[in-house]
Image (spheres, rainbow, N blue to C red):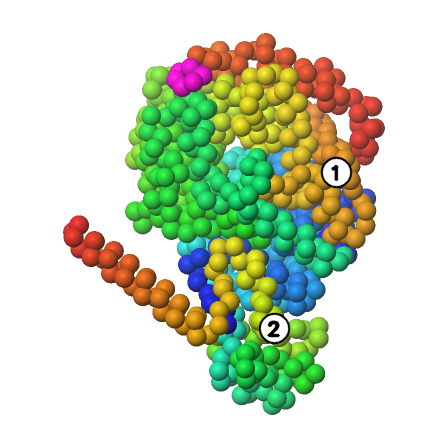
Amino acid sequence: MLVIDPYRCTGCRLCELICSATKQGEFKPSASRIRIVSNSRIGLSIPTVCLQCRKPWCQSVCAAEAIERDPISGIVTVNEEKCHGCRQCISACPYGNMGFDIDRGIATKCDLCKGTPRCVEVCYPNAIESKDLHKSLTMKSRILFGKTVQQSFASQKGTDER
Amino acid sequence: MNLYMGKILKIDLTDGKAWTEELNLDWAKKYIGGKGLGFRYLFDLVDPKSDPLSPSNVLIFMTGPVSGTILPNSSRLSVITKSPASRTILDSNMGGSLGPEIKYAGYDGIVILGKADHPIYLIISDDSVEIIDARDLWGKGIFETEIKIRKALGEDCKIAAIGPAGENLIPFACITSDSYRHAGRGGAGAVMGSKNLKAIVVKGSGGVRVSNMESFLDLATKMLSEAVSEAGDPSRSNLWVIKEGTPYLIDSVHEMGILPTKNYQEGQFELVQKINSEAVKEKKKKDRACFSCPLACGKFTQADGNMVEGPEYETLSVAGSNCGIGDINAIIKFNESCDDLGLDTISTGNIIAFAMEMTEKGIHDFGITFGDHEDYLRIPGEIAHLEGRGKDLSRGVRALASKYNGKKFAMEVKGLEFPGYEPRGNYGMGLAYATSERGACHLRAYTVYHPNPFDLDAMTKEVISHQHRLAVKSSLIFCFFLHSVNVDEMAQILNIGMGEELYSGEDLWKVGERIWNLGRLFNIKSGLEMKDDNLPDRVFEEGLLNGPHQGRTLSQEDFSMMLRNYYRDRGWDIYGHPKKEKLEELEVDIPW
């Protein structure tokens, strides 16, 4: 899966550009499977992309059974042949990570480029990294642990100064 | 169409009409986009003699063929108009993400004509153009304007807005996008204010096409990895941009002795360590990038409850050392305040420094002296709202100097205030300021790191060659900070993107010269003369007070020699008018 660290994201959106170029054949952020939500005033950008859920909401609402989950890799994909374009999956995804191709009338989503995500390739600040699930969990908890330790030190220092 | 969208959106605010026109392909071929194409459109629409703040001036937002693609640092948007500061042709470009959004909405450029009869803003969403009442936004700062618009229209819309400075027609008001990205110099914000246009909001759902995506991506990813590479030729390196951003320049320019200090009296600042890259790093929270930029030169800082993307070198120097301010917190606060009010920090800093010197010398009392942090922080608000002394200061250094008799040290050219490099320690920058089409500007030719900054011939040649290359770069448009791109590469990019052998590096060189001559023609037609290609007396007469170039001036003789040779090498006559043969050779399609 893609592990995201919003603290590192600079908001450059190169990921959206390479994604739309690869999947759609043009530079078209509105068609990108990964999206950057930014608030320039506070200097924050957060990449949002499919989490490849183990029990995908998009899959459970799909009457056409067009959403498939590979049992080994865990990658969730849209079978374009089967998709009716009803957009139920878009409403169902609690994270807003399903997209829709208006021209072709089908749902779109991140398929991790079949295992080598191109967005990772152009993410120079390393805000997006491709990890296998087990390792990424370990790493995520490490990052969180590190941040908590730092914060508690910082607050302690603050107390001392006061 | 490849790279281009093929359409120009025109909006006449006087009668509230909007329509699209086909992109003039002949002009696109000859002038590429951005600066060049914008100049050509401006020539077509504006009488060079017209009043910049009248409804007859137009405001052009022009993208370039590479905007919206994945090429590194390709997102910039050029704003072209007649400048209320210098009364010259003006091209001022901004980063952020508005340029690409305009292309995704389906346009290469947006042309704003006329004047609305009350404050309005525009919503451009693909084919639809709406004119919305903006009376409730008028008077609001840029940050609040963006928040209010985003609340109404969604987080993903892109906005160009003006603050109170633009509304009050201050000739150094900027147009701002993404909170901190400005078309900063030359007063485009005042032109927007004069049209009663508070903001332009753009939402685009389309895409930019290229001829062969696979080869284009190969080229782009190669350029991207080169741009961030630590290896290779150091003169093409962008590493300092990534690691430190422009604050890096402070120590280096200080060392060279050309850091503007106390209104350009000195070339070194005793408190330099309080405002250099290390000082900025202590306040830095994050790196921020414009659209499609792997370098992320924006250093987001926080101090005393203030936050800003910056301060950049220009703010740290012209509004820092040049005002005797050695306090990074004060500069961050100043920067945030100018960004919200919509003021160019370069001109604002320069004007404050001038007022400080006038006060210290007892010529006129503006009540502020070098290094007075607290009062310095009050001035941007006074200027933008035309309060008290701010009313005087808001007219710019040139007007201030003639009113209060301080011309000798009014550091401006053609009415545009000096940026952050002292020409007495680098003669090329003197020639660059004097010959830039929009007045004192460091982005038309940049000789700061040249090994022989006092070699008159080398400087003349260097300035001309930079002016051509940067004119091309500002037309595609690539950011100034993508050092590792030359005309041959730019030609290759256009050819691969368009799928035709359209240009060679040499052709683009000619395009650069063509654009430079076109700008010159506009300025001459607007009434500018040879005497306007000049520098303030301080540069000629007063030696620098400290540093490695202590006592050095750029003599009037040396300057005149450079200027004469510059005209000659350009194929202009002794008055600086392009000769007929030159214009024919360049195929400039303007009657002369």
Give yes or no for residue B455 being in the magenta stretch: no
Quick one: quadrant of the C terminus of chain B?
A: top right
Residue type indicated by callout 2: Lys
Say which residue appears at 64% left-offset and 30% top-offset. Answer: B466
Q: Which mark is residue B505?
A: 1
Instruction: In this rendered view, identify the residue nearer to me: A146 or A86.
Output: A146
Q: How many marks?
A: 2
Query: From this viewpoint, which residue is outermost toward the top?
Result: B557
Please say if B407 is above or below B100: above
The mark lying in front, picked from 1 and 2, is 2
**Circle 2 residue:** A114
Please report the bounds of the magenta region as a residue range.
B543-550
> Three-letter amino acid code at disc 1?
Gly
Q: Dot 2 lies on which element? A: helix
- The image shows residue B11, relative to residue B244, as above or below, that is below
10 Å crowding of disc 2: few (<14), some (14-19), many (20+): few
Q: Picture coordinates of residue A73 (x, y %)? A: 54, 78
Q: Secondary structure at mark 1?
A: helix
- Seen in the image, is B495 located left or right of residue A21? right
Q: Chain of mark 2?
A: A
Specify the quadrant of the image occupied by residue B280: top left
Residue at (47%, 60%) from the top-left corner? A127
Residue lying at 31% horizontally and 66% vertically, measured from the top left: A145
Q: Is residue B399 visible?
A: no
Mark 1 → mark 2, Cα distance in angstroms: 40 Å
